[in-house]
Amino acid sequence: MLFNRGILIASHGDFAKGALMTSEMFVGETTTDRVRVLSLMPGENISDFEQLFKKQVGELLKVNREVIILTDLIGGSPNNVALSQFIDQERVHIVTGFNIPLLVELISSYNVEIDVEGIISNAQRALFKVKSKLNVEEEEELCL
């Protein structure tokens, strides 16, 4: 039986690992057949990273109908590797510039059909200057 979707979170340094750990505080623990993390560390050989990236996505595709790759930065090595290896694969979606709200929503909904564009829009709306959205009284209430 295939799961609906797997998620590979790829970043520079430990950002992906920290993002998953933070998200699990809201949604509970995940499993490696559904969510995996890949970190490109300073000085790491890019060829080794590419091979590991390909292996992680391949393993996720064995047990999931689709895989969503989340990368930290457009133009960064994790994103470039994702694009070079998976841009033409129909079962793989690549999203860059991910944040915690996006990851939480993806994990929370991995058993149902989703609109990736809609989830991205929700994550974009989660980024805002607080004072411009709230008046002073509302901001003070939030801090209590």
Image (spheres, grey):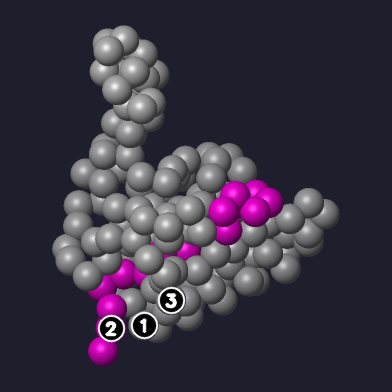
> Viewer-nearest of labels 2 and 3?
3
**Marks 1 & 2, CB-CB < 8 Å contact:** yes
Q: Which residue is mark 2?
A: 2
Percent from the top left, x then y, of residue 75?
Answer: 58, 40
The quarter holding residue 137 reads top left
**Marks 1 & 3, CB-CB < 8 Å contact:** no
Secondary structure, mark 2, is loop
37 left or right of 142 in image: right
Span highlighted in magenta in the image: 1-18
Q: Which residue is mark 1?
A: 63
Amino acid type at circle 2 is Leu
Amino acid type at circle 3 is Thr
**Marks 2 & 3, CB-CB < 8 Å contact:** no
66 left or right of 74 in image: left
Percent from the top left, x then y, of residue 42?
Answer: 78, 51
Considering only vertical position in the picture, is 62 above or below 141?
A: below
Q: Quadrant of the N terminus?
A: bottom left
Secondary structure, mark 3, is loop
**Foreground pick, 93 / 43:** 43
At horizontal 48% and vertical 53% (from top left) the residue drawn is 22
Q: Which residue is mark 3?
A: 31
At horizontal 29% and vertical 31% (from top left) the residue drawn is 125
